[in-house]
């Protein structure tokens, strides 16, 4: 029973992280319908940024967190400016392959700078955050992932639904040319969505770093786990990202705990294929119907 | 004897057959034959074993890259699992050769067919949908196949891998670098010929129509599902065939090489070579294989310098960086790749020295 509850707790916290990572991904998809294969690398960049600031430069926790977010915001802008803007108006397939190229490039750079080693953040989180219910122990990192996850998901849900920028983003995703002719500043919207996605990715990278340590390979693999999550939840749904993330997280820890660890790694992708067969637009995705 | 055709000074094509002809002039046809004769008759005798090894790797990579270009470049469907399908081909050939006892030529062909079937399993759910989904499904395919190769020990031998029998063709041992060269490049020539003719046939034109506008294509009566699946099957067949050849060439196979990084290398090949061009896939295969070799030679060279021995380990990941950078730069500055550069160079010589 203790094992079971521990697995549920682990699954939920990993699931929240997947949801958080998927959120940044859905952000870019919603504003430009680009599948971002470099999302895991953005996660890792954020985590290493924080590592350098908090461990090497010894800045206080809050300051280095804020600086990381600012840095990643700028990075998102730069990525859009230098890599994606030249491709505005090109076929979507080229933009998607550009993100694949960016992913390989960033990963190589990070491996060059930090190597494939595991790094640990110092114990910076207040222990008061940790929960102890009888036999179940929830570490502080997990609790903070719940909190950050919930706050982000709430804020971005409202942002897309009600703020003017959020509505611009949805309009750009729906039809770029139509949005342009209605006076939406498409380039600014795209730049902003990449910047916000980089910030969200950095946050999830940092939380993941607290939970499992910082490692280039692990973090960039999370970027690919996002795909089962968003397919299950529906590619363009923020609520779907949460539900999908939690389901995938639970599934992964349960399979890993009860059957075998290596099967746990691959089960999300099996689910992905099954979902594509029976419910291709996911649980909450908007169904696109086109008839000729 | 009919008159030789020279390149006219302008566009005087009157019929559709002239437009889709592979060789505009008789010179092209002659040069192809001369090139083939040089390739098959001279190259294997003047190259050292190491150079032959690289050329063979290029030939095998080029076959797989042509397949991927039919899918991405002509049909507009992205596959992120080409490396895994290459692995499926390698394992299919190995398993058929060791347990069923198929001869060399049959197991390589069967590897292609098996891979086409495996590919279609992942293709079916995604080709029903708009084009984004195939790349997600093939990404899943990549990880599932990697898992199966590693964990189905009864069939694949797990991490230990499989050792293949020597390749024999018509009773001759063809496993040495030089004799395998002929096997690789004769099949390469056949696969190229098939691909070049496929893309100008009814099927190829349907693929291109789907790539350019799938709604219009469906409106014109092209059954999209059927053709997308066909394109995916053909592309997987090429990958499997190349994988089978590769398995026989390296003799022992393990699951390690068939990672997502291999898939990304194939994507890099066709982007750098040129999307939607058969010669582009070949250029890309040459470029990436050479880049790989040069980078590993450079790493080795740095490792042998005593002062930098420690630094060499950290230099190795720069290989990934260079790949990524090459993909990004080509997409931004020359999205049509080396094939387009080659065309520009050629056409600037066309009217030389009297161009205006």
Image: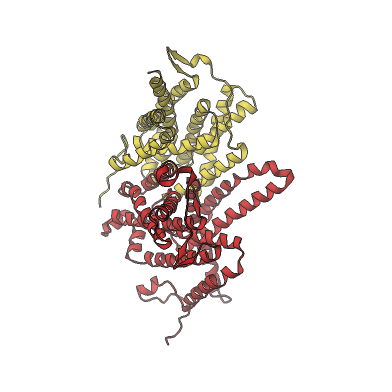
Coloring basis for residues = by chain
In the image: residue A52, left or right of residue A133: right
Location of residue A131 in the rendering, given as x and y in whole percent from the top left corner: 46, 15
Q: Does residue A290 lie above or below A205 as drawn?
A: below
Please name the color used to draw chain B.
red
Which residue is found at the position 55% from the left and 67% from the top?
B345
Q: Colour of chain A?
A: yellow
Specify the farthest residue to the top: A134
Q: Quadrant of residue B223?
A: bottom left
Q: Position of residue A112 (x, y in %)?
A: 61, 41
- In this picture, residue B304 sits left or right of residue B233: right
Task: Tell me which residue sits at (36%, 60%) in the image.
Answer: B208
Q: Is residue B34 above or below residue A54?
A: below
Q: Is residue A18 above or below residue B172?
A: above
Looking at the picture, tell me which residue is in the foreground, A36 or A159: A36
Q: Is residue B302 visible?
A: yes
**B96 or B353: nearer the eye?**
B96
Across and down, in percent, residue A118 comes to: 57, 31
Q: B288 or A35: nearer the eye?
A: B288
Report which quarter residue B1 is drawn in. bottom left
Find the residue positioned furthest to the bottom. Answer: B1
């Amino acid at each position: 029973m203790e094992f079971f509850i521990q697995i549920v707790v682990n699954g939920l916290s990993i699931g929240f992280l997947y949801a958080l990572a998927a959120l940044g991904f859905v952000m870019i998809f919603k504003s430009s319908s680009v599948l971002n294969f470099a999302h895991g690398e953005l996660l890792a960049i954020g985590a290493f940024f924080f590592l350098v600031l908090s461990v090497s430069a010894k800045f206080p926790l809050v300051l280095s967190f804020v600086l990381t977010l600012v840095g990643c915001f700028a990075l998102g802008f730069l990525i859009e400016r230098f890599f994606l803007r030249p491709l505005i108006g090109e076929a979507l397939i080229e933009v998607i392959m550009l993100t694949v190229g960016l992913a390989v490039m960033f990963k190589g750079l990070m491996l060059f700078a930090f190597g494939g080693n595991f790094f640990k953040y110092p114990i910076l989180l207040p222990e008061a955050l940790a929960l102890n219910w009888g036999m179940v122990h929830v570490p502080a990192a997990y609790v903070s992932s719940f909190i950050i996850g919930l706050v982000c998901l709430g804020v971005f849900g409202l942002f897309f639904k009600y703020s003017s920028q959020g509505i611009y983003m949805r309009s750009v995703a729906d039809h770029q040319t139509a949005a342009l002719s209605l006076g939406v500043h498409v380039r600014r919207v795209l730049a902003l969505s990449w910047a916000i996605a980089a910030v969200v990715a950095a946050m999830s990278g940092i939380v993941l770093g607290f939970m499992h340590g910082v490692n280039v390979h692990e973090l960039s693999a999370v970027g690919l786990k996002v795909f089962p999550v968003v397919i299950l939840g529906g590619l363009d749904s923020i609520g779907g990202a949460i539900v999908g993330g939690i389901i995938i997280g639970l599934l992964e820890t349960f399979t890993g705990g009860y059957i075998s660890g290596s099967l746990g790694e691959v089960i999300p992708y099996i689910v992905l294929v099954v979902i594509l067969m029976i419910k291709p637009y996911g649980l909450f995705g908007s169904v696109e119907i086109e008839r000729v | 004897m009919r008159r030789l055709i020279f390149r006219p000074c302008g566009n005087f094509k009157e019929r559709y057959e002239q437009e889709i002809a592979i060789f505009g002039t008789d010179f092209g046809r002659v040069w192809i034959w001369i090139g083939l004769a040089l390739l098959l008759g001279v190259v294997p005798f003047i190259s050292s074993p190491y150079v032959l090894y690289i050329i063979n790797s290029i030939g095998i990579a080029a076959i797989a890259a042509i397949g991927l270009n039919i899918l991405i470049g002509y049909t507009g469907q992205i596959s992120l699992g080409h490396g895994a399908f290459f692995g499926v081909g390698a394992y299919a050939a190995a398993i058929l050769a060791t347990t069923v006892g198929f001869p060399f030529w049959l197991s390589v062909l069967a590897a292609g067919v098996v891979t086409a079937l495996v590919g279609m399993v992942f293709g079916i759910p995604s080709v029903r949908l708009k084009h984004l989904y195939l790349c997600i499904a093939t990404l899943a395919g990549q990880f599932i196949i990697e898992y199966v190769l590693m964990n189905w020990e009864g069939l694949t031998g797990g991490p230990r891998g499989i050792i293949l029998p020597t390749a024999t063709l018509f009773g001759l041992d063809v496993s040495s670098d030089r004799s395998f060269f002929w096997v690789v490049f004769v099949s390469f020539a056949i696969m190229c010929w098939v691909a070049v003719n496929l893309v100008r046939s009814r099927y190829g034109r349907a693929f291109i129509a789907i790539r350019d506008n799938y709604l219009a294509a469906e409106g014109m009566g092209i059954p999209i599902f059927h053709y997308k699946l066909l394109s995916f099957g053909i592309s997987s067949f090429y990958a499997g065939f190349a994988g089978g050849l590769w398995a026989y060439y390296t003799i022992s196979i393990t699951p390690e090489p068939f990672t997502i990084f291999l898939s990304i290398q194939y994507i890099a090949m066709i982007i750098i070579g040129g999307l939607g061009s058969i010669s582009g896939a070949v250029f890309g295969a040459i470029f990436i294989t050479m880049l790989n070799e040069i980078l590993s030679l450079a790493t080795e060279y740095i490792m042998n310098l005593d002062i930098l021995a420690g630094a060499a380990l950290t230099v190795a990941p720069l290989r990934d960086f260079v790949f990524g950078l090459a993909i990004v730069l080509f997409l931004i500055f020359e999205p049509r790749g080396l094939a387009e550069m080659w065309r520009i160079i050629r056409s600037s010589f066309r009217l030389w020295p009297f161009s205006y």
